[in-house]
Amino acid sequence: MRREDLTTREERILSAIIETYIRSARPVSSGAVVRRGSLKLSSATVRNVMRSLEDRGLIEQPHTSAGRVPADRGYRYYVDRLMGPSVVSNSDQAQIRAGISVLGGRDVAIVVTEVSRMLSEVCKQLAVGLEPAVESGVMERVELVHLEEGRCLVVVGLRSGQTRSSLFKCTESMSESDVAAATGLLNDWLDGLSIAEASQLLGRKLKDKDCPFRDLIRAIHDQWDRIFHLHDSERVHYEGARYILRNPEFAGDASLLGEILDSEEALADLVRRPGSREVVVTIGHENRRRKMAGVSLIVGSYRVGETVGRIGVIGPTRMQYRRLVGVVDQFSRLLDDLFSSSHWPEAR
Amino acid sequence: MRREDLTTREERILSAIIETYIRSARPVSSGAVVRRGSLKLSSATVRNVMRSLEDRGLIEQPHTSAGRVPADRGYRYYVDRLMGPSVVSNSDQAQIRAGISVLGGRDVAIVVTEVSRMLSEVCKQLAVGLEPAVESGVMERVELVHLEEGRCLVVVGLRSGQTRSSLFKCTESMSESDVAAATGLLNDWLDGLSIAEASQLLGRKLKDKDCPFRDLIRAIHDQWDRIFHLHDSERVHYEGARYILRNPEFAGDASLLGEILDSEEALADLVRRPGSREVVVTIGHENRRRKMAGVSLIVGSYRVGETVGRIGVIGPTRMQYRRLVGVVDQFSRLLDDLFSSSHWPEAR
DNA sequence: CTTAGCACTCTAGCGCATCGACTGCTAATA
DNA sequence: TATTAGCAGTCGATGCGCTAGAGTGCTAAG
């Protein structure tokens, strides 16, 4: 038995405190726990248990003669061991499925933005979506298209189904057949390489003075980063900022709100975590940044081909963990499905 | 002389009140105006003028024995007639140019997002970017690319330089030459049409039972909306929400903040305005939505080919109109330049 | 027309008393 | 021994009165 383990009665009371607090946002008194009904105890007994929970750092008292408020460790215990499996209500289910279903075949950036928006609406919290780092994706096909006026379009398709394209000027002298030949050459070279490997390979080829289509390939190589690289900040999409101030914790003090809105770095942190399939809950001080005390994250991951992206919600530690973990998980799974290739739209 | 016209002295005092208030965020007293130095008047005289300005609805008193605060009409008079030409400081200039210069050739959605971010940083306000409605763009070139496993990529290039692409499954039986033939056919049909016209034309062609490549063309037609249509909400990018709560007007009451964060509709309103080249300032109650009292918008427009997009900032009516109008204008002009075709990157 | 002077008004801030919600402790109870 | 009833004590929230200070509006003089 771990030192942290609580008796059944203690666990029940902790659950009662947390669940009541999540609803009311006000310190929970011993009387309130008793009134809740599920325990047959006097308020005095509950008070004794509360004191013990407080000694272990699971709950705390804003001041003497106030009720108790869950501490970060209390939420952690609740999330890990008490809240039980998170089930998603039928109406949430339906809303999520309907929303996702119309996004098939659209660009990843748009899908992530829209999913963040839906997530924020379902959760009534600030939601965040992180696009996968396309750099680690694997090339499938390169296509050059010669437009008039010496302008050229390069389209790169990845195995994941993502495509990127970029325009550039090229020397006027290229004939249609030249373009076709260059296209074939590029595909021979690049098929199956990652974006980063492809860039290196193009660099090596350019060192050879006899490299065919050298100007063209140099132009593509020069643009490679422009085509594929996104700064962290460009990959992050926030939606639903309006929900954060519906939380009463912001009534007096807006600094917590500031932390949330500035929390882009917190997301960057999450990027570096191993890409577990599970939904990850980060509570208050568990965030690396000191100022993020008071803020929790619930983050899930989804795969696009070989790459991994994330979606999640950010809010005060007083969150509906049970429900929201389920919702985030549901969204993650459906995104996985959406991006698996069988879901590209079919021609009739 | 219009009824609204003020004497020079009145105008000076109005300017002094507004500029002092913009800096201090606190009601401006007659003494404060005198202390400012530029007028040689006693506070009593200033008080008389203030009363007259108040009678005309240009300023107001939060309560007796308080100083004066600009009213929406006062800001309007100031913006239209007093603030003078908005010059952009050299450091702002440099920052803006540097930021824009690295965006050449990138996708419009990314450019708009990044420009919104820069705008919010330069202005220290919530910034918003609206992508142009690509539906009214004009087709330049369609390209089909046949990938393995019966998957097909369609790439549509617009005259503006924007490209859109989408994957779909097609019947396995298409040979490379079939694809090339279909590409040629589509280009013959669609060159020079707008997106909407192209959709109609494809629809008409499909009615002909002998239409070549009918399955393929039906697949493309089915996806046309998916490729091009963005809901208003998908076209709007907000950045810099953190800045809005640095404004002291949100110290006590967060409802104004709520209005700002919910103001997506306000932007949708702006879409429908005629696409004037000028920067448009909308002050407080001038917004259609009643709740937006207290919130101002400064919005500029930019062209991408035949289509028009917008960028702007949103904040409390107490804004640095002079500086921000200049900054928004500068961004708009540089975006115009960026999207004019001569700025596509050149191959060396 | 401008200004000095003065009476008046209203807010912000402080201290104080009260009220009520809770706790913590103790002693009685099962 | 575990539980509970009872009660004293603590602390925030609320409301009230007071004061200081900033700023106005008015009047009469320059």
Image (spheres, coloured by chain):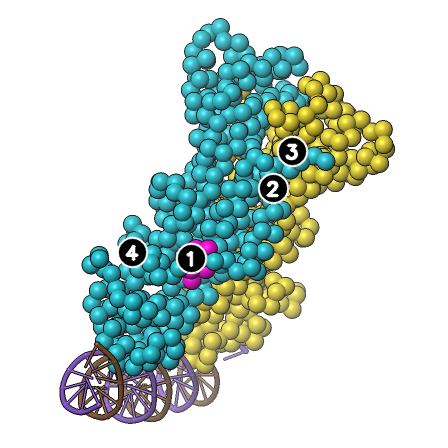
Chain colours: A yellow, B cyan, C brown, D purple
Mark found first going from the N terminus, 1 or 4:
1
- Co-location on one chain, circles 1 and 2: yes
* Residue beneath disc 3: A168
Q: Position of residue A21 (x, y in %)?
A: 44, 65
Looking at the rendering, the stretch of residues picked out in magenta corresponds to B320-326
* Side (left or right) of D9 relative to A54: left
Q: Which mark is residue B104?
A: 2
Instruction: Pinpoint the chain carrying mark 4.
Output: B
* Residue beneath disc 1: B85
Q: Residue at x 52, y 60 (%)?
A: B89
Label 3 secondary element: strand
**Above or below: residue B332 compared with residue B244:** above
Pointer 2 local density, CA inside 10 Å: few below 14, some 14–19, many at least 20: some
Assess whether residue B321 is covered by the magenta stretch. yes
- Co-location on one chain, circles 1 and 4: yes
Q: What's the amino acid at mark 4?
A: His
Pointer 3 local density, CA inside 10 Å: few below 14, some 14–19, many at least 20: many
* Residue beneath disc 4: B285
Q: Quadrant of the C terminus of chain B?
A: top right
Q: Does the magenta stretch mainly form a helix, a strand or a loop?
A: helix
Q: Residue at x 62, y 33 (%)?
A: A167
Label 2 secondary element: loop
Instruction: Pinpoint the chain carrying mark 3.
Output: A
Q: What's the amino acid at mark 1?
A: Pro
Q: Nearer the viewer, residue B87 or A28?
A: B87
* Side (left or right) of C2 relative to D12: left
Assess whether residue A260 is covered by the magenta stretch. no
Find the distance from the CA under tag 4 to the CA under tag 3: 46 Å
Find the distance from the CA under tag 2 to the CA under tag 3: 10 Å
Labels in figure, total: 4
